[in-house]
Image (cartoon, rainbow, N blue to C red):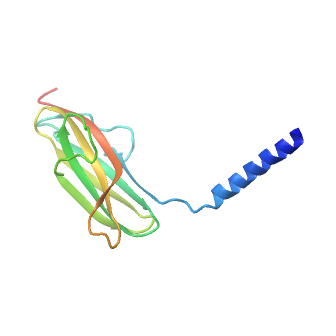
């Protein structure tokens, strides 16, 4: 009896492994941020007005959907923290590009914030499929929390 159960268990594992590895991979898109040196370690957190009031980060977008698609990166800034997505404010900048299958896109996104306070800088990824009329939010986004002060 126990040998039969072991054989059923092993057979189930092999069948499961076969089915999982034979299914076509699901497509995806991604967005991520890099610091000015193109590393993911030293993100800006503090800006000083009249000194370094400009936020500079690299935004990277990847298309792994299996077809060419049009992308928007919508840069938004709000005071405080975000409560809903997509953020319901007008973008201060929109970067747009059509990416081929498996193509990557990098943007140096610059944002100036001149009033003291705590801000959320949001980079939302939007997509427009071929034949579609409107962009749709992909639910992929990045947020940097930034403090702006008059002087250090």
Instruction: Report the residue at 29% width, 56% height from top.
Output: 107
Residue 101 to residue 8: above or below? below
Residue 117 to residue 75: above or below? above
Residue 114 to residue 100: above or below? above
Instruction: Report the residue at 43% width, 69% height from top.
Output: 67
| Residue 37 appearing in the image | no
Q: Front-most of 38 and 149?
A: 149
| Residue 134 appearing in the image | yes
The quadrant holding residue 81 is top left
In this image, 130 relative to 19: left or right? left
In this image, 91 relative to 115: left or right? right
Image quarter of the N terminus: top right
Q: Position of residue 116 (x, y in %)?
A: 12, 32
**Residue at the extreme front of the image, as rendered:** 1
Q: Position of residue 101 (x, y in %)?
A: 44, 67
Image quarter of the C terminus: top left
Instruction: Report the residue at 16% width, 51% height from top.
Output: 90
Instruction: Report the residue at 26% width, 65% height from top.
Output: 134
Residue 113 to residue 65: above or below? above
The quadrant holding residue 135 is bottom left
Q: Position of residue 128 (x, y in %)?
A: 32, 65
């Amino acid at each position: 009896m126990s040998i039969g159960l072991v054989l059923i268990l092993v057979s189930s594992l092999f069948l499961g492994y076969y089915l999982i590895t034979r299914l076509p991979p699901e497509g995806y898109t991604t967005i991520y941020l890099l610091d000015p040196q193109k590393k993911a370690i030293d993100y800006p957190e503090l800006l000083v007005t009249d000194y370094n009031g400009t936020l500079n980060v690299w935004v990277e977008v990847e298309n792994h959907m299996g077809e060419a698609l049009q992308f928007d990166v919508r840069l938004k800034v709000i005071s405080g923290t975000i409560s809903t997505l997509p953020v319901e404010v007008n973008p201060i900048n929109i970067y747009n590009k059509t990416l081929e299958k498996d193509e990557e896109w990098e943007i140096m996104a610059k944002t100036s914030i001149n009033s003291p306070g705590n801000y959320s800088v949001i980079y939302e990824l939007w997509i427009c499929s071929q034949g579609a009329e409107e962009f749709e939010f992909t639910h992929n986004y990045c947020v940097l929390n930034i403090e702006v002060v008059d002087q250090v």
